[in-house]
Image (cartoon, rainbow, N blue to C red):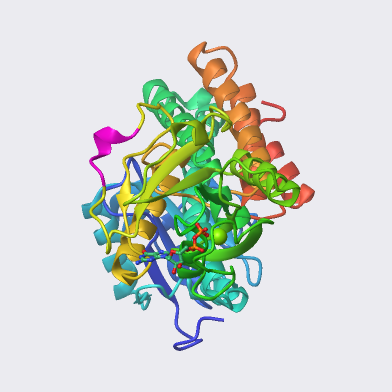
Amino acid sequence: MIADRPDDTIAAVATAPGRGGVGIVRISGPDAVKISSAVCRFSGDKTLESLAVNTLAFVRIYESGRLIDEGMAAVMRAPRSFTGEDTVELNLHGSPVVLAEVMSILTQRGVRPANPGEFTRPVEGLIRAKTLKAAEMAVNQLKGDLYHKISAFKSDISWVLALLNAGIDFSDEDITFADHQEITQKLTALTEETQRILAGYRQGRMYTDGVRAALFGRPNAGKSSLMNCLLQNERSIVTDIPGTTRDTVSDYFELNGMPVYLTDTAGLRQTLDPVEQEGIRRAYDAVSASDIAVWVIDAAAPFFEEDLSRIPSEVSILPVFNKTDLAPAPAKEKLPADARLFAPVSISCRQPESIDALKIRLTEIFTDSASSGESPVFVTLRQKTCLEEALKYVSQALDIHTGRENEEMTAFLLTESLNALGAVIGETTPDEMLNRIFANFCIGK
Ligand SMILES: Nc1nc2c(ncn2[C@@H]2O[C@H](COP(=O)(O)OP(=O)(O)O)[C@@H](O)[C@H]2O)c(=O)[nH]1
Ligand SMILES: [Mg+2]
């Protein structure tokens, strides 16, 4: 599965440098269990080989009789692991020094440090197979971000679970594993981070569903010309005869990976022509249904405040002064004081670089309005539902933990949240495994 040399056993620190209290060392390959086993000590007569798969156990790492660190170990067997090979995961303390030491010990015992990206390559391949279109590439990039975020959440929750259960397991041995404060902080951080991702939902949606923009303004302002510039084809009829565009004309174009459904509309003016009247009615419909309305204004001609009066209050409006090759744009103070208006942009359909500047403005407006300053994370509706469920469980776990009511209930809720998070990234957790985790953690204690 891992391309370079399939017989190698490789290892890497799987957590980002300097991050939080947990550091994960992942060892993958045919000798992963054998080599790791030599440095892992468990309670009783347990060994790494004898551990039930996909189950966390309290472990101490020893080398030549010296205690290096302690934490939790899990074994995953091929092909049911992240890499598809036998894999050992050591959840240790996050200290870079300790992690480097563990890596060095493993290397001396015959493990090769993984090359950058070597662990993720099989997963990347899956992603790449689907990204034929440029727009999809952007989306999958974002999907990858979500995958990594959720994986990090899951490790954090597993860590808390392990701490809780070590506390429950060893409660009669007078050892304290679970620092109440540390768990509270971790769960609080997880709750906040999940809320941030959910806030990014709308932004993620923009990349899948696209956004809607409508061009409106007086006849001959250059709406159809701008439509054709943005689409980079002659979709709309352009003439110097006012009232050329009557029906709405719509098409997609791509704005930095975001599909924009753009609608050109009939010019707004008083008219007795019933066909044109219907066109103007449709123009207002399109504008009302858009995420942004682009108000195209001939820089040399007067504009009409009344054109804004039929536009609903929730529609944002970007004023665009066109034909600036013929006349300078009026000062922005001349525009009506209307809360829906963004600062105006000056363009000329005869000057392509001014259209690029407009595209940059549009991108800024869409990404800003979407949320939070957080980098966009792609979230589908299904994933949003799973995330909301995970958030519910983690919040409840936090409440119960804070109230010091019942740590077994806290552990149960966290296991449920792991399940929901697994569903976010498309993992189906077999019931059998869930039951085992549950049995290991909660029952009969
Ligand atoms: N000089 C100049 N002419 C323009 C520009 N944009 C559009 N036009 C011309 O203005 C006229 C009306 O353009 P059109 O796109 O049909 O306007 P619409 O009625 O708003 O759709 C056409 O003759 C266009 O060639 C521009 O930026 N500069
Ligand atoms: Mg037109």
Range of magenta residues: 330-335
Magenta span includes 334? yes
What residue appears at the point 44 percent right and 70 percent down from the top-left corner?
Answer: 35
Q: Position of residue 152 (x, y in %)?
A: 46, 48
Quarter assignment of residue 318: top left
Q: Position of residue 230 (x, y in %)?
A: 47, 66
What residue appears at the point 57 percent right and 74 percent down from the top-left corner?
Answer: 131
Please identify the residue farthest to the bottom as the structure is shown.
5
Q: Is residue 74 above or below residue 443?
A: below
Residue 131 visible in image: yes
* Side of 412 relative to 195 (left or right): right
Residue 48 visible in image: no
What residue appears at the point 53 percent right and 27 percent down from the top-left corner?
Answer: 313
Magenta span includes 389? no
* Side of 200 relative to 363 (left or right): right
What residue appears at the point 32 percent right and 52 percent down from the top-left corner?
Answer: 300
